[in-house]
């Protein structure tokens, strides 16, 4: 697109980057408050974030749908407890449309660079559609969004079809093929049962066995949905119940013995019930404390692994030569397709290399010892920058949407404060940021994420810090991080008035 395209929203109060649950949630709240001076820049051609990009067979949420949705847009129509990805994507598209976000969305507008301007105290965001200017920049760019390929020698020379689980090639026919799946994380265990049904042979490369608990999925009957539609309180009660049940599960992550034993028992008895072969069961038994990696939910993964056309290779994929994939224990497999389900860039976010604050410093440099932010939302040297679903927000036991909404509340209060104070710039000091980061590091040190004896995507391998995770009950995040305290921020300068 030429940079000269006229755009009423080129110069705004708030620039939001990213149109997933975070960016759309904030956009909806701004619209509902009658704000019009904001733009949402999205690099893709549609809204949805994770739910637009992950279209692999079997994709679904693993936090119950009544809870895995906005509290301010509950949905009585979820088809089941753990709704398929397409339904969640449709929910987000409908939310964007019905809440009037259309005029605020700019697609194909990747943030290539965002720069704080010391003269007018505003942000400039460069995109393929030209520059956008804003008083406030909100990075809602996600942390499970940029795919990560494993460093496997020869992978790029694989002669068959190769794709990442979050970039599924629906044009390639998989039926009757010899397929390898790399990884046994949350995506892989949803994919494997689906591919097992259609593959000639399926090899699953497992570097480390996951803990899997029963899923207990079920459809919502028409009677239930009618009740949800008629009486909003029934949806809210269900959300409430699911939230507190999930939040109680954090006790196990705190290594409290009884809760830990209960969580392990749920997983290991599930394995015992579903897998009778002791040799296979041994391969599927994790060698670290439960909760160190994400606890997975599935009723059909273990049965799929036992199908005659499926082989569990209890070793990582080590190298690829032509159409042959070699495991770390030297087994060779001839494959037509390799599905890489190895997750995302989580601790060293690509977007942080594109955001430049005071003195032209890159956020990635500021974070060279690990991501951190005051109340998970604001960071020193980056005035009027707010992060949604960034450092210190990830959960293994409850809904991320809850975290995002708490952050939106903080942000809306910050915007109100700015409006009431002549648009003054908000910035935290390094001391305030470091103190909050220290509190999170100390909290994480008491959790299974640090002490559970595994390596996971929650950890920054550069320093062993659990920079992505909120190391506490989710409700404590709201208590601590949703309130906005202007005293925590320096606020001397004012953004120059818009032209
Ligand atoms: C398969 C899968 C299943 C999941 N299931 C659950 C679940 O059950 N429960 C749960 O709590 N969480 C789950 N999650 C986590 C999920 O990511 C969050 O719940 C939530 O969707 C995050 O929303 P977001 O808007 O913060 O980020 P995203 O959904 O990642 O959206 C970020 C958006 O920013 C855009 N973007 C990134 N960089 C740029 C740029 N430079 N310029 C412009 N646009 C950019 C991206 O294209 C994307 O649209 C799951 C994640 C995955 C991948």
Image (tube, helix red, strand yellow):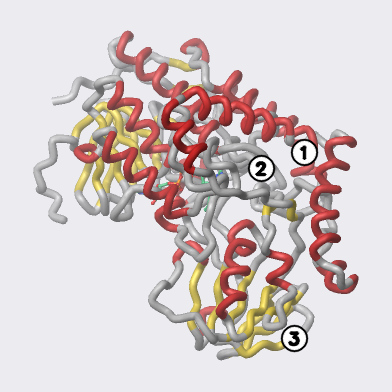
Give the image location of residue 61, x and y in percent: 55, 49
Q: Nearer the viewer, mark 3 or mark 2?
A: 2
Q: Is residue 364 left or right of residue 6?
A: right
78 up-or-down from 383: above or below: below
Identified at 71% across, 77% down, the residue is 307
For marks 2 and 1, the one nearer the N-term is 1
Q: Check whether the beta carbons of the residues at disc 2 and disc 1 lie within 8 A of each other.
A: yes
- Residue beneath disc 2: 396
User: Relative to 161, is 412 on the left or the right?
Assistant: left
Task: Give the residue drawn at x 85%, y 54%.
Answer: 269
Q: CA distance from mark 3 to mark 2?
A: 33 Å
Label 1 element class: helix
Disc 1 within 8 angstroms of ligand 1 (CB): no
Are the residues at dot 3 and dot 2 in contact (C-beta closer than 8 Å)?
A: no
Which label sits on residue 331? Answer: 3
From the image, tell me which residue sits under label 1: 253
Considering only vertical position in the picture, is 348 above or below 308?
above
Q: Residues within 10 Å of mark 2 (few under 14, many from 20)?
A: many
Q: Quadrant of the C terminus?
A: top left
Q: Circle 3 — which element?
A: loop
The image shows residue 197, relative to residue 224, as above or below, that is: below
């Amino acid at each position: 697109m030429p940079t000269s395209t006229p755009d009423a929203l080129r110069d705004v109060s708030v620039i939001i980057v990213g149109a997933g649950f975070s960016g759309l949630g904030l956009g909806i709240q701004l619209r509902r408050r009658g704000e019009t001076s904001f733009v949402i820049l999205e690099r893709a051609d549609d809204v949805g974030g994770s739910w637009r990009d992950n279209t692999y067979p079997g994709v679904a949420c693993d936090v119950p749908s009544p809870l895995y949705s906005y509290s301010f847009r509950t949905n009585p129509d979820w088809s089941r407890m753990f709704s398929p990805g397409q339904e969640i994507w449709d929910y987000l598209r409908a939310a964007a449309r019905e809440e009037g976000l259309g005029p605020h969305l700019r697609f194909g507008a990747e943030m290539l660079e965002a720069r704080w301007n010391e003269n007018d105290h505003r942000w400039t965001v460069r995109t393929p559609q030209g520059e956008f200017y804003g008083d406030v920049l909100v990075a809602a760019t996600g942390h499970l969004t940029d795919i990560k390929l494993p460093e496997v020698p020869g992978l790029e020379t694989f002669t068959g079809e190769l794709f990442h689980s979050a970039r599924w090639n629906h044009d390639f026919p998989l039926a009757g093929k010899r397929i390898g799946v790399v990884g046994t994380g949350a995506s892989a265990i949803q994919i494997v049962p689906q591919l097992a049904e259609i593959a000639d042979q399926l090899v699953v490369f497992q570097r480390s066995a996951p803990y899997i608990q029963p899923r207990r999925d079920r459809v919502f009957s028409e009677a239930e949905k009618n009740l949800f539609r008629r009486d909003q309180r029934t949806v809210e009660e269900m959300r409430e119940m699911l939230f507190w049940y999930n939040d109680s599960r954090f006790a196990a992550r705190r290594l409290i013995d009884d809760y830990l034993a209960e969580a392990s028992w749920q997983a290991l008895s599930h394995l015992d019930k579903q897998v009778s072969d002791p040799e296979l069961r041994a391969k599927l038994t994790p060698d670290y404390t439960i909760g160190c990696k994400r606890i997975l939910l599935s009723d059909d993964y273990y049965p799929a692994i036992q199908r005659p056309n499926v082989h569990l290779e209890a070793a990582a994929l080590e190298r690829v030569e032509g159409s042959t994939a070699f495991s770390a224990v030297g087994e060779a497999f001839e494959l037509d397709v390799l599905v890489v389900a190895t997750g995302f860039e989580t601790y060293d976010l690509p977007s942080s290399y594109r955001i430049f604050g005071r003195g032209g410093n890159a956020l990635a440099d500021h974070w060279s010892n690990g991501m951190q932010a005051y109340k998970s939302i604001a960071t020193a040297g980056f005035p009027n920058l707010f992060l949604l679903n960034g450092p210190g927000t990830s959960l293994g036991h409850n809904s991320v949407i809850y975290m995002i909404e708490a952050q939106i509340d903080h942000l809306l209060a910050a915007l109100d404060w700015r409006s009431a104070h002549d648009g003054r710039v908000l910035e935290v000091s390094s001391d305030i940021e470091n103190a909050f980061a220290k509190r999170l590091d100390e909290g994480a040190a008491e959790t299974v994420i640090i002490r559970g004896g595994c390596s996971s995507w929650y950890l920054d391998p550069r320093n062993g810090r659990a920079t992505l995770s909120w190391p506490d009950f989710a409700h404590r995040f709201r208590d601590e991080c949703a309130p906005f305290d202007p005293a925590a921020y320096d606020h001397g300068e004012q953004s120059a008035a818009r032209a």
